Amino acid sequence: MRNKEMLLIPGPTPVVDSIYDALAQETRSHTDSRFVAIYRNAIEMTRNMLKTDGEVFVISGSGTVAMEMALVNTVAAGEKLLVISHGYFGDRFIKLGEAFGIEVDVLQAEWGKQVSPSEVEEKLVNGKFKAVTITHADTSTGVAADLDALVPIIKKHGALVILDGVCATAAMEEDMSKTYGEADGKIDVILTGSQKAIGVPPGLAIVAFNLTALDARAKIKQVPAYYCDIYNWIPIMNDPGKYFATPPVNLIYAYEEGMKLVLEEGMERRYKRHSAFGKAVRAGLEVYGMKALAEEEVAAATLSCILYPEGMDDAAFRAALAKKGLILAGALAHLAGKAFRIGHMGNTTEKMLEKAIELIGETLNELGYSVDPTKAVDCFKKTVAIVS
């Protein structure tokens, strides 16, 4: 990679040379047949990755735009939404729903833990909810949702499943053709962005609707949106030569290349690689006395929130690492200054993560802690080998 730093944050994530090369191609008209072919291929590869029987949308925007598109096209003002929140980004659905007049209820887990399926069951029994949002991997806590447990409960009660895959898609299993429990127990909407496990620069909102979710949109006569109304985008997704809003041409070039890399590696292989990296990073850091906020059985494959040992100066620690070329993210909300977040997804490699473990150990020693980087790196290597 031509990157000068190791960008191991929860996103954006490292970009490989072939994606940079695609991004740097000559900008063409968004109606040029050469670009249209690339856009069409990118859309089709997204459909193949998520395996939906409905529509896929790849448009200019962030993960927040994807969240809004998913919500306003499925839940109308006055209807009820249940938010299953495992951290800061799950909570965003609360204000998002309220902004559109949706009646929002929420189940909030203690940070680092999961909402229990029994709590979800109790909520759904006692209230008629149109949809339930699940954050697959919460970027603030490193907690992964248990889809095998949650989806069947939600579908049993007739609600739509809206999955926030921003920090999970292309790294943790998200298959819209998969049946959870009952015959119709499927994920109805998946939303994500380009800059995390897909490994492309930020700027694309990606959303997939199945036929059930499209039927929900059909029953809403008019949504409180223009840009995020899927009815304005379906003609373009089916024929990218048509015009609604100018697409980010060069970013679509990069996204097509990124999707090629994802599908060439293969989804099962990607899921296994990300799981191995996550377990190994957490095991290596634990040698330093650095414990993950999320217990291993609920930890995400894509990022980890790591608690500092007593007395650590967060700013000094991350600044020292930045001078060595390793960029980590601070923690959010009440954990700010008490933890850091490390991404291990997308185009990150075993070599990069091994080097990160080593640099973190070196820096801890420089800051007055006595740790053994060699032991931590060995633990990382052994865990990767065992898991993979």
Image: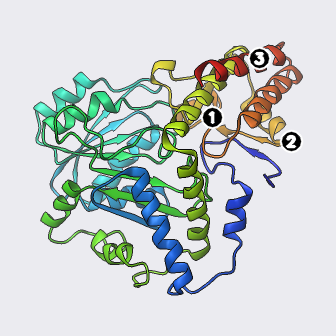
Q: Residue at horizontal 28%, vertical 31%?
A: 150
Establish if 112 lies above or below 316: above
Residue 213 % position (x, y): 22, 56
State the residue position of label 1: 341
Q: Give the side of residue 173 with respect to residue 338, left or right.
A: left
Earlier-in-chain disc, 3 versus 1: 1
* Residue 353 pos. (x, y %): 72, 33
Give the spatial CA distance, label 2 vs label 3: 24 Å
C-alpha span from label 3 to label 1: 22 Å
Question: Looking at the image, which residue is at 63% across and 37% down?
Answer: 344
What secondary structure is marked by label 1? strand
**Residue 327 pos. (x, y %):** 74, 42
Bin the neighbour count of mark 3 within 10 Å (Cα to Cα): few under 14, some 14-19, many 20 and up: some
Q: Nearer the viewer, mark 2 or mark 3?
A: 3
Mark 2 vs 1, N-terminal side: 2
Pick the quarter of the image with the C terminus: top right
Residue 260 visible within the image? yes
Circle nearer the viewer, 3 or 1: 3
Q: Nearer the viewer, residue 91 or 250?
A: 250
Name the image quarter holding residue 16.
bottom right
Residue at the disc numbered 2 = 323
